[in-house]
Each structure stands twice: as C-alpha cells, then as structure tokens.
Image: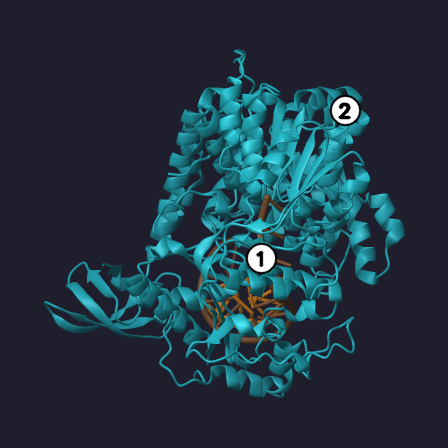
Chain colours: A cyan, B brown, C orange
DNA sequence: AATAACTTTCTTTTT
DNA sequence: GAAAGTTATT
C-alpha cells in the first residue's frame, strides 16, 4: 500500500570505484552553463540563489551525481536535506538513474527531522533517552500541556493550549531555553508559557518522548556536550546539501553550521522570494546572510525560468515587486508568451467551485489536458470542501493533498497510541489517549485520582498504574486499571522478540478497538475498521522491507514523520487540490488559485503587519509560479465562513498585479485599482475602508444579540439554492449520484435532506421505483 | 460511568 | 460548521 521506507541507508561495506570521467561529463549534459557552474563547484560553501522554475532541485541532483561520478565522495559521505520525504525519494531515484543504483546506495536523504530522528535513535543513550522514544506531534504535545495547565492552575480558557504550545514551540525554534525565555517574557500569555516551558520539557523527558522541535534541538545539545560525537558525524558527512534553504529555522541553521564546520562543503539552494514558513520559525535571514556567514562561499544565481510562460512570469514578477525585503533578482525565460491569465469572479464559493470545475472539464475535453495536469490551490484547508463538492458532482477525479491524512485519522491515532505505549510505557500522552478507549470503566474520576497519586509519589502515570493497589482507588476502579495494566504489560514484554506485525495484530485484537468499530455498524465505522486493517498490513510490509531494522518502534518513529505529501498515489491521473503551502516545489500545466479575497488571502491576521503581509504575497508568488501554461485566479463575492454566508471583497493582490497579462473570463480587460490600496501608511497597508477583521466583526456586529444570531443560524441558507448535505458517512450521497442498495439494486439519488443520523435521501431505483431512505441504515454504495 | 444534548469558541499555513 | 467543553439524563 504505502511506502514506508525513507531514504536512509547504512553504509555498505563494499566500495565502488568512481565511474569513469566520461560519465561524469555526461551528467552535465542538458544543464545550462550556470547550472553547470553550480554543479562543478564541489568544494567549499556554495550558495545557489534561484528563482522558481529554474531547475534548483535538478541542479542539486546533478551535483550529487557528479560528486559520486568523479569520485569526490562516497555515497554515505553525502547528506541531502529536502523539504519533504517525497522530494528526497524523487531526488534519490534520479540520482540512481544518473549513476546507477549501486553507486548511489548509502546516501542519506530526507527532511531535517527525519534525518536527525535517525541520529537520535542511534545516540539516544547519550542524552538520557532510550532508542524507543516516542515522537510527539502537535496533538500529543498539547495533551501534555493540557495536563500541566491543570496542575499549575492555568485557566485553559484564558490561555488556550494551542497558543501555549505555539509560544513554546517558537521559543524552541529560536533555541531559547526555558530559563532565557523566562527572562524575555513581555506579556501575560508569554509569562504563562514561560511557566509551562520547563515542566513541559521535563514531562517529555520523563515520557521518553520528543516533540518535533526536540528532534532538532537534542542533536545540537548532544553535539555541544560531546564534541567527539559531533566530529564523527562531521567526518561521516563530508558533503552537505540543503534544498529550500530559505525555509530553515535557527535550529536547522545551527545544525548545518555545526556539521559543515570541519570540511566546509555545504551547498544550499533557495529563493528568498519563496520563503513562506516564517510562521513556524523559518528565518529568511539564513539565506540572506549566507555570504556573511561563509565569506569564501561561491554564489551562483539561476535566473532563467524553464517552467512558465512569459505572461505568467510577468504576473509573478509584478507580485513580488511589491515587497520591500528581497534580494535583487531578475527572472527571464525563453518560453512563449502564452495565454493570458484569467480572472474569474463568482457569486459564492459554490459558484467559484463550479466555474473551476467547468473550466477543468472544458480544458480536458477541448484542450486535451489530462486530469493530472491540473492543480487547484487555496489558502486554507477548509476551502477544499466546496471544490471537492463541485468536482465530485462533475465526475472529475481529484485528490486532496493534506487536510485529513491517513495518520491523522482518529482510529489510526488510537491504534498508534496503543502501539507506542507497548514500546514505551512511559509515553504519557499515548497513555492518556487510550486509557479509557474503548471504554473500560476508567472514567475521569479514576484518572484524576491516578494522576494525583502519581504526582504525590513522584511517579510517571504508568508507574502509578503499576502500583494501583497503593493508589487508594475503589475496588471496581482498581480492577479496571489492573486489567488495563495487564493488557499493556503483557504485550510490552513481547515487544523485544516478536515480529512487529504479529505483535501489533495481537495487541489490536486484545484492545477491542476492532469490535468497537464494528459495533457501530455505520459506513464510517466500517471505513475506520478497514483503515485499521490497512495499518496492520502496512506494519507487516514495513517489517518485510526492513529486515535489519523492522522493529515496531522504528516503524512508529518513521510514520510520525511522514506527511501526506509523502504518501503514494501521485502517479494517478487526478486533479490535485492543496494549500498554497503544500504546492511548494511542484509544477502543473494548469493552476487555479481560488479565494483571492480580503481576509482570506491575504488572511485578516496578516494584514496588520508589513512582514506578515509580505509573506502572504510571497505565498501568492509561489502559487502563481507553479503554473507552466495556464493560470486562473478566482474570488467570490460572498463566502460561507463561521457558519454563515459572509460578503467578501476581492483581494488587494489583484490590484497590485500587472493588469496587462490578465483577462476576465469573457475576455475583457482586468481593471486593477491600485488607488484602492493606500500606500500612505505603508507599515500597515490600509486598504480602502475594509476592516481586516471583516468576517469576525460581521459575525458579531451584523446579527446583533446572541438570540438573534441563533435565529439567523437556524434559518435556511440565504442563497436560496438547494443545499447539498454532506456528512462524513454519506459524503458521496448527493443528487445525481448513482448508488447501489443491497435489496433495491441500482438507482439514482434525486435529493438529500436532513443531516447526521437524520439524513435521508430520495432515490429512484430501476427495479423498485422511488424510495426514501435513511442514510444511516440504507448502506448505499456509490457506483460509477 | 456513559451517553445525549446543548453551548461556546474558534480557525492559517506544517516539519 | 466543527471541535471542544458543559450540563442533563440514563
């Protein structure tokens, strides 16, 4: 099903002679002179500054292949860090094509996080962890923080867990220690975060767990504390490559500097204009100051664009010109002028989605574009819904990237929590997640008493469970807890010697999760059940494909670092839907950017500060430059947000842009109104009289008091259109869809009403005629 | 202790 | 309109 193997191989004992020089030169064929220059600069620091579509990754790939071919480096002396695991895998495949599979075996390629998680697994004992440590995602981290807030009596309403986590996380990204952070606090919220930061780190350590930020921080701590270990890695990786360098944070920057300090062979590729991850600590300064940090650096600029038409490039250029902070760079291309960029105006997000769907169909049928040539990009994941709806109705195959990925599904997280617990019983976040799922009589009260007991005795929650008898619980509760204890302990004792998949299968069976899912007898339940089965087979596959290191704990660490973008399925011929962020590094012949509205893109929160606004603009730039041949921009005059239809105003970005390359759908000229953007107050970028918090204000202000608001909510949808009901279980059941019923056979859905368990559909069956069915029980299957 | 019904709050983007 | 939190009911 899925590929779990990341691109990390251990050094092979056999050495291979470098390929003959003639082959090395062949690797350079097909590269532009500038690209070749970057490839040939093998020793010392190299900075490649490159615009979109200039062949950045290609240059890096060929450079690595060239290194191997001329015999400068053995594969295991190369570390290549990319933005996603998928990008790493693709790069590795291409290198294998260039120099042969054998010659490429042993290169380490992957994300910073995945690479250093591997390092930490090896060196765990040196930092007081075991190699089976758990890796915490945002969810797990917040679970820990929620517990701490309770203990320190911090009101989770006033200071929500989310913001506590993001403050702590950004402190960690900047490598600020708990002590330092305590000294730096400037606000009430920060003070609470500072109070939690230390205990949070302590809780993670006790749980033998690391969060994403720790995966970068711990290696730095280790390298600082233990120079011998650092030197071992410096000597191992003599050649460092970092893709998307503009998106590295301070910790990543530090790691790169440490590793490169000895041999100095650090080659980074990036484009400051494409920096879109400042919100999670990425520091544009890293790329801007590379030449200062490495005075001997060779700098190569790749400015020729091989991807897009002239018009698209001109549009992109007019976008990025609005930003103050940027390196001087001029993009050019030998490509054709191309089609005009089309701007589409829609009445609502439904209308917008429909227009996009029709355009795709039209280009597919008349332009001959296969579905895989299209991408629809948007600012927030929530926007995918209306687009999906329209595409589904139009019968256009699509795939949503991001959003709810396989590993984020509840049932998968539940099962993974059990598995993690067996491998690492001190993993408190997992323990608390599953201690009473499926319900086994350990309710809130009992849990609270256990936690209090653990705290009194200075034990971890698991240790407290090991000693239930002393916890002073009621007989019934104590029994339930010891049954749970037995369940975990029994499997934990087998973890070391049983194969991962057999152990997982047994454990899952014993937990009763499968029965619980089967019991609710709904289509969702069935789907969840299947997902769990799929996970089990994934574990088996992992164990089979990693004969030397196929343990359960290795599996768990690996899957916690997989992203949706890493998962397979990209060779399928489908339209791709994704956020603008997720589109980074990709290219498509036809690109749509939807939702160009004030408050949405740019987001309301980002319009206050020039730096934030510039990041939004770069995001627009990134999106526009994904397009090779055709680019469509769209906005809606109203949008369903916060549970209500809200009026919307078209994005200021559309007023900043070169209007000559844009045509309306009807072929008319686009009238940008740069005057609406008042440059007078450049720091905030006041826009007409549009309030940046448009939507929220509207929600509260326009509908008056709470009671009128509730009434407004109950009223029918304002656009008067028949609303299509979407529920998890019946997501496919919409008017027009052909379905099959166990008894009635095949039919066509005429209409749908109600929601949730009350959802009913009127279906016309070929054999038995029209029927009204309750979706919950009807078990309709979509066909065709 | 578990479930159902109701209320409130909140929304960016992600390794 | 969803998720998380709260209260009422069994």
Element carrying mark 2: loop
Q: Position of residue A534 (x, y in %)?
A: 38, 41
Which quadrant of the figure contains the C terminus of chain A? bottom left
Q: Residue at x 67, y 35 (%)?
A: A267
Q: Choose top left, top right, bottom left or bottom right for residue A363.
A: bottom left
Q: Residue at x 36, y 63 (%)?
A: A731
Which quadrant of the figure contains the N terminus of chain A? top left
Extreme top residue here?
Answer: A14
Q: Can you see residue A208?
A: yes
Foreground residue among A177 and A587: A587
> Which of the labelled discs sits on residue A262, or is there none?
2
Q: Choose top left, top right, bottom left or bottom right for residue A113.
A: top right
Q: Can you see residue A207?
A: no
Foreground residue among A496 and A66: A66
Q: Is residue A359 above or below residue A300?
A: below
Q: Position of residue A305 (x, y in %)?
A: 55, 51
Foreground residue among A498 and A78: A78
Q: CA distance from mark 1 to mark 2?
A: 35 Å
Kindly identify which residue carries mark 1: A622
Foreground residue among A73 and A720: A73
């Amino acid at each position: 099903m899925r590929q779990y193997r990341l691109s990390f191989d251990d050094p092979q004992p056999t050495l291979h002679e470098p390929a003959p020089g003639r082959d090395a030169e062949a690797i350079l064929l097909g590269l532009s002179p500038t690209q070749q220059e970057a490839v040939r600069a093998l020793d010392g620091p190299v900075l490649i500054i490159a615009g979109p579509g200039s062949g950045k990754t290609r240059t890096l790939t060929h450079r690595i292949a060239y290194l191997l071919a001329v015999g400068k480096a053995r594969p295991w002396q190369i570390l290549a860090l990319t933005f996603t695991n998928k990008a790493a895998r693709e790069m590795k495949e291409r290198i294998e094509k260039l120099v042969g599979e054998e010659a490429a075996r042993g290169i380490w390629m992957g994300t910073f996080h995945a690479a250093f998680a591997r390092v930490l697994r090896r060196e765990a004992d040196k930092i007081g962890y075991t190699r089976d440590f758990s890796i915490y995602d945002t969810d797990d981290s917040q679970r820990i923080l929620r517990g701490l807030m309770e203990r320190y009596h911090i009101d989770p309403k006033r200071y929500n867990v989310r913001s506590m986590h993001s403050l702590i996380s950004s402190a960690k990204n900047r490598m600020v220690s708990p002590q330092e952070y305590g000294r730096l606090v400037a606000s009430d919220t920060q003070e609470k975060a500072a109070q939690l930061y230390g205990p949070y780190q302590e809780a993670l350590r006790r749980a033998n767990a690391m969060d994403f930020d720790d995966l970068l921080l711990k290696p730095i701590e280790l390298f600082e504390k233990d120079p011998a270990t650092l030197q071992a890695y410096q000597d191992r990786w003599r050649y460092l490559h970092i893709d998307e360098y503009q998106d590295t944070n301070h910790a990543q920057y530090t790691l790169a500097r440490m590793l490169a300090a000895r041999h100095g062979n650090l080659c980074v590729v990036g484009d400051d204009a494409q920096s879109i991850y400042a919100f999670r600590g990425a520091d544009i300064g890293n790329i801007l100051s590379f030449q200062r940090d490495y005075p001997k650096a060779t700098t190569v600029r790749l400015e020729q664009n091989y991807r897009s038409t002239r018009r698209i490039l001109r549009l992109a250029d007019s976008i990025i010109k609005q930003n103050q902070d940027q390196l001087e760079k001029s993009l050019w291309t030998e490509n054709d002028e191309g089609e005009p960029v089309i701007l589409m105006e829609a009445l609502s997000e439904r209308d917008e989605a429909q227009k996009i769907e029709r355009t795709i169909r039209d280009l597919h049928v008349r332009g001959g574009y296969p579905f895989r040539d299209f991408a629809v990009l948007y600012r927030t994941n929530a926007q995918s819904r209306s687009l999906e709806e329209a595409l589904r109705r139009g019968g256009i195959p699509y795939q949503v990237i991001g959003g709810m990925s396989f590993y984020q599904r509840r049932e998968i997280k539940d099962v993974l929590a059990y598995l993690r617990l067996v491998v690492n019983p001190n993993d408190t976040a997992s323990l608390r997640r599953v201690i009473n799922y499926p319900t086994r009589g350990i309710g809130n009260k009992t849990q609270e008493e256990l936690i209090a007991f653990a705290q009194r005795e200075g034990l971890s929650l698991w240790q407290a469970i090991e000693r239930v008898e002393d916890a002073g619980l009621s007989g019934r509760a104590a029994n339930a807890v010891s049954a749970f204890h037995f369940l975990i302990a029994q499997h934990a004792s087998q973890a070391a010697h049983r194969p991962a998949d057999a152990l997982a299968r047994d454990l899952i069976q014993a937990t009763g999760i499968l029965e619980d899912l089967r019991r609710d007898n709904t289509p969702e339940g069935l789907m969840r059940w299947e997902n769990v089965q799929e996970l089990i087979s994934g574990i088996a596959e992992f164990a089979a494909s990693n004969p030397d290191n196929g343990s359960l704990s290795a599996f768990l660490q690996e899957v916690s670092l997989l992203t949706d973008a890493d998962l397979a399925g990209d060779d399928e011929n489908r339209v791709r839907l994704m956020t603008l962020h997720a589109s980074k590094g990709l290219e498509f012949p036809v690109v749509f950017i939807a939702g160009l509205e004030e408050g949405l893109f740019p987001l309301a929160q980002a319009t206050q500060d020039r730096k934030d606004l510039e990041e939004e603009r770069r995001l627009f730039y990134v999106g526009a430059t994904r397009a090779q041949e055709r680019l469509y921009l769209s906005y809606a005059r109203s949008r369903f947000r916060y549970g209500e239809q809200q009026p919307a105003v078209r994005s200021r970005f559309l007023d900043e842009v070169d209007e000559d390359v844009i045509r309306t759908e009807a072929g008319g000229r686009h009238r940008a109104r740069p005057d609406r953007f008042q440059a007078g107050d450049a720091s905030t970028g006041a826009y007409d009289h549009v309030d940046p918090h448009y939507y929220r204000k509207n929600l509260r202000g326009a509908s008056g008091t709470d009671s009128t608001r509730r009434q407004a909510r109950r009223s029918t949808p304002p656009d008067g259109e028949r609303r299509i009901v979407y529920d998890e279980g019946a997501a496919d059941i919409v008017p027009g869809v052909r379905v099959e019923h166990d008894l009635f056979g095949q039919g066509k859905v005429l209409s749908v009403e109600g929601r949730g368990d009350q959802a009913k559909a009127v279906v016309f069956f070929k054999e038995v005629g029209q029927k009204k069915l309750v979706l919950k029980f009807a078990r309709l299957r979509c066909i065709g």
